[in-house]
Image (spheres, rainbow, N blue to C red):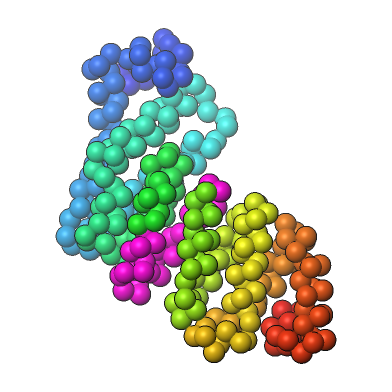
Amino acid sequence: SYLEDVFTSFNYDLDNSLNVLSNEEEKLLYDFFAKDICISLKCLELSILEKKLIGINSLNNICLQLTNMLNMQNHNSQMKFLVQFKAKTIINIFDLHNIYEIIFGANIHQAIISKSVFVLKFLYRNNKLNTNQIANMWKLAQEKHQSIRESIFCTMSELIALFSVEDANYIINLINEMQYKEISEYTLNLVESIANAINNEEQKKNIIRILFNYSREDNFDFGLDKRIIIKSRTIFAKVLLNEKYKNFLLKYLKKFAINIACHRYLNTSLCVLN
């Protein structure tokens, strides 16, 4: 095909190859990749939820497939170039249409957020989801109704493994500032995802401290739901048994033993030990 002929006579490094392509050839390739993306975006921008879901599902699949292809190591030079060009095309189109605003703007809907994980992962990997936008996601979770909060927290739980140390710190600090009455199972799921994702020692210390506080029976008097306390203890025990938290395990075993001997936090200490 003509598209195949375009790639037969030069080095398939993206930046160098774009200099070799004529404007007409580059436009042809861009239009070829942009077609499905633009149709999906058009659906996503409609007011009918069913159409919006078709759009976000399609974009999610495109981003997932492309991410998998970018991670493959056995591409020949032609395929590598095509995958890189398609990634650049998607990024340009997402920028042009402000995909973040479409998802988190005036027409925000929990179903769309829940289906946008691979789109948001693609944006983050390509430096198109910044700290200010993450902060806005958190702000929306606090201001909107419960279903929005739950969908944002679930989405953040999926994204957290990609976060930089700075972005992970930002989220940990926000969790630290939450009032006990605001803590839900979705908050705990986010905390557990952070615990599994982080490797920074200071961050691990902060997460352990958060889980210990959530596990304390006396915080029931300060608005922490009993179900949250019980689930926190289970997560706390799992995290302490994680290999990368072995430095904290002995410390907390000693702490629990002292608590039991001094009749402090008996329920917490016994439940976590069990």
- Residue 222 screen position, x and y as percent: 52, 85
Q: Quadrant of residue 112?
A: bottom left
Main SS of residues in magenta: helix
Q: Is residue 158 magenta?
A: yes
- Which residue is more in the foreground, 236 or 82? 236
Q: In this view, does 130 lie above or below 35?
A: below
Horizontal arrangement in the rendering, residue 110 relative to residue 244 (left or right)? left
Quadrant where the C terminus is found in the figure: bottom right
- Which residue is more in the foreground, 35 or 108? 108
Q: What stretch is highlighted in magenta?
A: 137-165
- Residue 111 screen position, x and y as percent: 32, 65
Horizontal arrangement in the rendering, residue 174 relative to residue 216 (left or right)? left
Q: In this view, does 243 lie above or below 96?
A: below
In the picture as drawn, the residue positioned furthest to the left comes out as 47
Q: Is residue 11 above or below residue 82?
A: above
Q: Is residue 3 above or below residue 154?
A: above
- Residue 173 screen position, x and y as percent: 51, 61
Quadrant where the N terminus is found in the figure: top left
Residue 266 visible (yes or no):
yes
